[in-house]
Amino acid sequence: MADMEQVLSRAAEALPVPEPGRFADAVASRLRSPAATVAAPRGRVGARSVALAVAAVLVVGCALVGTLVAPVRSAVADLLGVDGVHITRASPLPLPTATSAPAPLSPTTSVAPATSTPADAVAALHLGTATTLDAAAKALGFDMRVPTTAGYQHPDVVLVGTPPAGGMVSMVYLPAPGRTTVPGEGVAGLLSEFRGHLEGGFFQKLASAGTNVDAVEVAGVPGYWLSGQPHEFFYVAPDGQVDTETIRLAANTLLWSAAGITYRFESALPLPSALAIAGSMQDAGTVH
Amino acid sequence: MDEATAVALAQAGDVNAYAWLVRRHSAAAVRLAAAVCGSAADAEDAAQEAFVKMFYALGRFRPGAPLRPWLMRIVANEARNQQRSGRRRAALATRSAGTAARPGPAADELVIAEAEADAVLAALATLGERDRVVVAYRYFAGLSEREMADALGCRPGTVKSRLARALGRLQPALVEQGVTMTDG
């Protein structure tokens, strides 16, 4: 392999890299822009639910047109025992679509639909290898929880993949009667579970223009309802460090964590329906 | 200023101290991003986005923990998100030399090196994410095996075998892309 290692090292050296000073200045200027300011954790503000409209600004790259404008500032919500929600601006996040060159499912997958459409829709989400809930629980070392709401007890496809480092189980709900299909995605819902927790004084969210964040209560614990656009969010991994994860669907997302596991439910459903589904969740072992 | 001091200052909100850290790690971050997202042209955007996010996450960074693996993991995540999104899937061309600082070999050597780097990125793009990230951490971010273990969240003993497997899968892809190797 020695020669291959040389090839790789040479390729790395040959890649264009920005002048470090210019690059650092670009980062720093984004951090100093008013729109990028992150609200410091603050005391409770008392509102029960605060919708944080995020207008945004973008600066970065060539693909982004122009710059914006409205200062995005997070007045943060401090509800339900959460110290603060930090909102920062970010580039508009890409919309994953089932039609944009979906990657093939892994050869080990057990998904073999009659038509390619559902498999393409699932594969485009890059969620890992298809498996079962039992196998996923063994692989990840924690019990999956699944909704008991009618229509959502049985995900159509269960996948396990990384990142996050410790692995994530994803349950895909395909379009079916009684489910609301997410426009353009070819799926009706996505429930993901992974080790990590959302932290009060820290929960950081990077939103694109027009995104709303509501602090909500999910089955007795603090959660967040992100609507409007796909998002990225930070969570605290089991090793105590901060990591990022990306919302996969162009949909509404309910995020919460309990007992060291972070849950994410993405769907086209309105908040009350999503809360009802989340609130119905029980250990998979007791449901199946 | 040493790194621990810069981290402490940045955690307190000092953007200048953070910029100092960014300068130190920018080249490795951009190379890593290129290898992970498959596009040298998009790598700078991905790395910049990652550094902006990291500033906000830094407050939660555990003092004394190794910084580089943590930084690189977030860069890889951002680059992976870009790659996954497919929004720039078409771009496999490297950015023209005009905007980037390069070491100074002769022009023809530069062209050859660029062409090879393009071919390597194209070969890496055929790998699965796990393999691609392992190779990228080692050869593009320059992480040690120990740092790779931190970044990958695996045991140090696992790194070597994961890297070997990834390289084994990369080799035919490099050949396919016309990259010549004298052995191996």
Image (cartoon, rainbow, N blue to C red):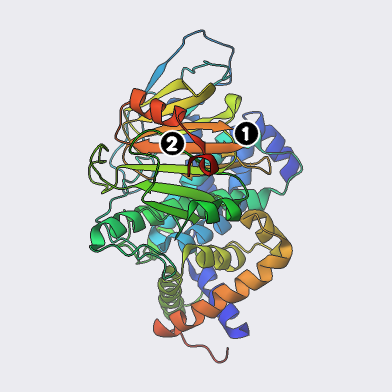
Q: x and y percent of residue B28 in the render?
A: 57, 58
Tell which subunit mark 1 falls on.
Answer: A
Residue A72 visible in image? no
Residue B92 x/y as whole percent: 35, 66
Horizontal side of residue A163 vs B5, given as left or right: left
What crowding class fits label 1: few (fewer than 14 Cα within 10 Å), some (14-19), or many (20 or more)?
Answer: few
Is label 2 in a helix, a strand or a loop?
loop
Q: Is residue B59 among what the camera can see? A: yes
Q: Which residue lies furthest to the bottom in this view?
A: B182
For the residue pair A20 and A63, the one nearer the viewer reads as A63
- On the rendered structure, is A35 left or right of A244? left
> Up-down: is A13 above or below B48?
below
> Mark 2 — on which chain does it sit?
A
Circle number at residue A147: 2
Measured as percent of width and height from the top left, residue A110 is found at 40, 64
**Residue furthest out toward the right:** B64
